[in-house]
Image: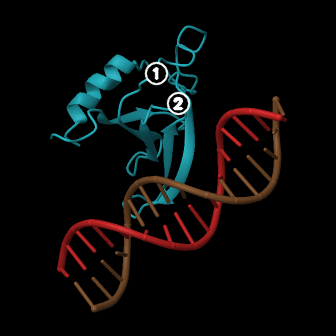
Chain colours: A cyan, B red, C brown
Amino acid sequence: MAGRPSGRIGFRTRSEVEVMDDGFRWRKYGKKAVKSSPNLRNYYRCSAEGCGVKKRVERDRDDPLYVLTTYDGVHNHVTPGSTSSRAAPAYSAPTAPAWTWSELQAAAHSSESY
DNA sequence: CGACTTTGACCAGCGC
DNA sequence: GCGCTGGTCAAAGTCG
């Protein structure tokens, strides 16, 4: 409800690597094995200062080929390379991924109560 | 040279 | 009261 990062959203995307280049720079600041999942949970933070955006990436427990990406917060600075050639994510997808930030946010909105 | 990454250990809060 | 988990920080090393 209130008094909370206005941007807490969880995404479930199918990808082989958890490294999604969404146009921002993420700095890994921690790794921990949570009991809720047999896999390891990676903690990322926006490298931009003033941008206290936190991101945690974890592999799905029922679908190891899926990655659960949860974002906490919103970006304060513009995307480092949004005007360059880094418009679309560079993560490899065996088949047509068809994922859009707008769609992801829309799906996240539904999953916000997560 | 600068920037980024990795690992371990520590701390706090909560539940029963 | 105790145990457990989750989360964060720091330092060092390496790479282009």
Q: Check whether the beta carbons of the residues at disc 2 and disc 1 lie within 8 A of each other.
A: yes
At x 53% / y 38%, what residue is drawn? A18
Q: Which residue lies under the disc numbered 2?
A: A48
Rendering quarter of residue A91: top right
Name the foreground residue: A105 vs C9.
Answer: C9
Q: Residues within 10 Å of mark 2 (few under 14, many from 20)?
A: some
Left or right for C9, reference A109: right
Name the foreground residue: A22 vs A36.
Answer: A22
Q: Which residue lies under the disc numbered 1?
A: A77
- Asked if marks 2 and 1 fall on the same chain, the answer is yes
Figure quadrant of the C terminus of chain A:
top left
Residue C10 percent location from the top left of the image: 61, 58
At x 49% / y 40%, what residue is drawn? A45
Residue A50 percent location from the top left of the image: 45, 31
The chain carrying label 2 is A
Please identify the residue farthest to the top as the structure is shown: A83
The chain carrying label 1 is A
Between the C-alphas of marks 2 and 1, the distance is 7 Å
At x 23% / y 29%, what residue is drawn? A109
Left or right for A64, reference A70: right
Residue A12 in view in this figure: yes
Q: Amino acid at mark 2?
A: Ala
Determine which of the numbered discs, if any, sits on residue A31 in the image.
none
Name the foreground residue: A34 vs A54.
Answer: A54
Rendering quarter of residue A14: top left
Q: SS class of the residue under badge 1?
A: loop
Left or right for A25, reference A9: right
